[in-house]
Image (tube, helix red, strand yellow):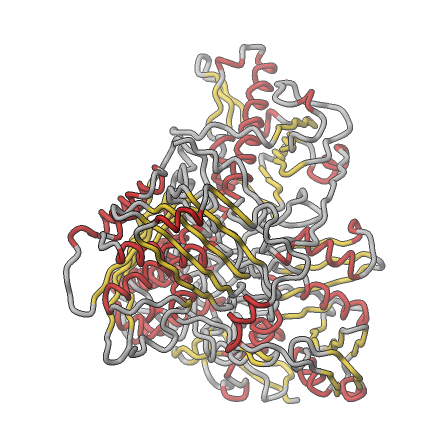
Amino acid sequence: MSDTRHVKLPWEPERYELAAAQAYHFDLDRREFFKFLGAGLLVVSVLKSASWTQESGGAKARRGDSLPTEINAWLHLGENGQVTVYTGKVEVGQNVRTSLSQAVAEELHFPMEKIELVMGDTQLTPFDMGTFGSRTTPTMNLQLRKVASAARDLLIDLAAAQWQTDRQHLVAVDGKVRDPRSNRSAEYAALVKGQELTQSIPAEDPLEPAGSWSVLGQSAPKVDGRDFVTGKHRYPSDQKLPDMWYGKVLRPPSFGATLVSVDLKNAELMGAIAVHDGNFVGVAAPSSTIASAAIAAVHAEWKTEPQPSNQELFDYLKKNPAQGKDPTGDGDRFDLGNVDQAFASAVHRLQQTYTVSYIAHVPLEPRAALAKWDGDKLTVWTGTQRPFGVRSELAEAFRMPEDRVRVLMPDTGSAYGGKHTGETAIEAARLARAAKRPIKLTWTREEEFTWAYFRPAGVIDVTSGARADGTITSWEFHNYNSGSAGIRTFYEIPNQRIIFHPSHSPLRQGSYRALAATANHFARESHMDELAHTLKMDSLDFRLKNLKNERLRAVFQAAADKFGWRKRPSKPGHGFGMGGGYEKLGNIATFVEVNVDRKSGNVEIVRVVSAFECGAIVNPDNLRNQIEGANVQGLGGALFEAVQFQNGKILNGKMSRYRVPRFSDLPVIETVLLDRKDLPSAGAGECPMVGLAPAIANAIFDASGVRLRSMPLVPEGLKAT
Amino acid sequence: MAIVRLSINGRPYSFEADLQTSLLTALRDLLSLTGTKYGCGEGQCGACTVLIDGQAQRACITKVSAVAQRKITTIEGLSSGDKLHPLQEAFLKEGALQCGYCTSGMIMSGVALLNGNPHPSRSEIVEFMDGNICRCGTYSRIIQAIQTAGKELAESGKGAKQ
């Protein structure tokens, strides 16, 4: 098949929290670079749209003064032999610090343990939009490979010049350039001694996927794993500064409440610095205990407005389209053929509605920020997937230029799409300005459950038409509010009408790992099973009959073989189901066995088999880890996670009231990796999640005859129907 | 406020604090032992697990007044010098972490389990560890790491000390 999917990674309209993102241009001075980094070799990855093309791909290193402005990564090799790579990407547990180090080691021919990555520091690293959408592997990994490969070429050039020989006789191995004929060799460090060399590489020209990788494609362990198992690593919430105080923010009693009056006297009597500025009320105190007591002592009056509750949610979403949104706009609508005509002539026609609830990310590390002012300069350490976006938010909040704001992102205790925004950073910075000292603010779990944003809830209406032989002829799909990621069907259907209808959301909503692909796959793959059942066809046969995409067929076949779909036993209470699709350049098929106890209503997930293909595999063990993790996290949303809310209040915003998957929920998870060395590598943080929920729903139907169309499927077990 | 004296990782600490202060706040804010994490504040997630006389306990719901005179071990005190505890080694070997934020608590709970039961079965591990949450979903690897460390401890013949 022709695979053009990797060319375009469109923005999904449901990334509401990113709507205000600003473009940024990075100005650099070459001399400043070397002053900061020390002498040596600097290779810069540049977006092609930028000028400086005369340098691209040239073997000669540059000695001029200016550097291009649209830089997205760079590599510095110092006279001391240290390699430092700068990227605006961040580490939240997806292990890109390791996989990007592998990319550099692979192409530079340099020991991985001597490579340091500086990530997500707005002062030191080039601009990056953010770490989301499974983009790090398809973009940054390739860009760093190119940078490292150019650096290696340059080092060979340097050696050739020094030794007055032809570069084609020389090889670069393990941090040295060597001439095998004379056995002469030189360390990289020695070659760049006293030099200040720069070269720029166009970011957009990817290298061909290599079949001969020796570092990439291997299961390199987490590069700084030792710091994590010894408790040495400092997460954002672990950051400290001398004279630091602790912050606390006053939260409204419900969503949509407005502050009428506030009395800060009691808080101030306790020794806290109290701030009331617009709609912000907060305190700073020498200890977190005093800060908590002081915020509790603030007396405030609020005016509340009636708010929707989750009982009426799905009705509400269908009846309240988002203002100013045109559902017929680009990306929100897809039409093919003549749907209505095809429905009229279809032998079988099926219409069903599916729903998904709001769920919370529950990153184990809640939002945290440490803010410090030096005169009119602000520095904030915080856990965010968008350090540059948070810098913009801070600059806007404090009406100051961005170059006076620095945001640093220490490797963070997970995010799953939930840490794109900078509210905690702004809160800490506001308190730090008032207290005239550094302030650390760590959200409580309850704050995280209430004042962060949620994965959008949604309603999905699906209508399908098919011929008696199992050919799907018509497909209509309406998604209300949950989002348009993964909304298009990958089955071959001549007549389609697919529309995303954004709604006014009663709760603050935003990105969640895999976005709406989870909801859309749940509806689509559940519906496919229902249609197969109507047609009295085997679920796998029915899918394959309507599926041409070779990569997707391959994962369905591979998962079916490993799972033993064709040989599945008939066991009382046991049921088997599948779900799959593609998303973010990856292909997934997940097969599930459940055991349903109709008496107690208990649903046990016995076994999960996922086959995944995302091009050339960068790190097999980490890939398995991501697939296993996506399935475990996906279990929660599939089976029992849902945010309960009533009249502007979250009812289950505590760890004791909001159930997330635990050890006892763990099924046997088997993964099958399809390694396509001929294809570019794609990310794996999101796609592996999308097959699980429909596979479970389909397996529950197989076991019990009960068709469940709402996620979570069995928050209180399978009720008698 | 009172003077609190604690024995942590074999070292004496004394500091001024309200006796109602949680052990977690004392460790993190007052003593800069930040390896022990805040996750929920109600003893539900296990991120703050420490050992009190060798038993796993949630530091977020433990008051400092309750652990004076007791032997407290945190993740920082588990290795001896450069030598990691076998369970720390096993976490690295099995790749039993993603973001690593739950790791300290997981390792401390795992050590407590191995202290009492050097050869736990899968179901014993699941039961003992069920109060520790890993949002990245590395549970199967953590189970494997605990079993690997159990074997290592049995072979080295000394068992966990803390």
Q: Nearer the viewer, residue A587 or A387?
A: A587
Relative horizontal placement of residue A687, taking residue A193 as reference (left or right)? left
Tell me the residue at 16%/69% (across/down). A572
The quarter holding residue B133 reads: bottom left
Place of residue A281 in the rendered image (x, y in percent of width and height, measured from the top left): 75, 76
In the rendered image, residue B137, in percent from the top left (x then y), is placed at 40, 61
Which quadrant would the N terminus of chain B be assigned to in this image? bottom right
Q: Is residue B99 above or below residue B45?
A: above
Q: Is residue A23 visible?
A: yes
Q: Residue at x 44, y 49 (%)?
A: A340
Residue B102, image x and y in percent?
A: 46, 66
Q: Is residue B83 visible?
A: no
Q: Examine the rendered structure and indicate whether residue B9 appears above or below residue A481.
A: below
Decide if residue A11 is on the left or right side of residue A623: right
Tally the marks.
0
> Is B60 or A640 nearer to us in this picture?
A640
In this view, A365 is above or below A487 = below
Residue most extreme to the right: A375
Place of residue A119 in the rendered image (x, y in percent of width and height, measured from the top left) = 61, 48
Question: Quadrant location of the C terminus of chain B?
Answer: bottom left
Residue at 27% of width from left, 44% of height from top? A558
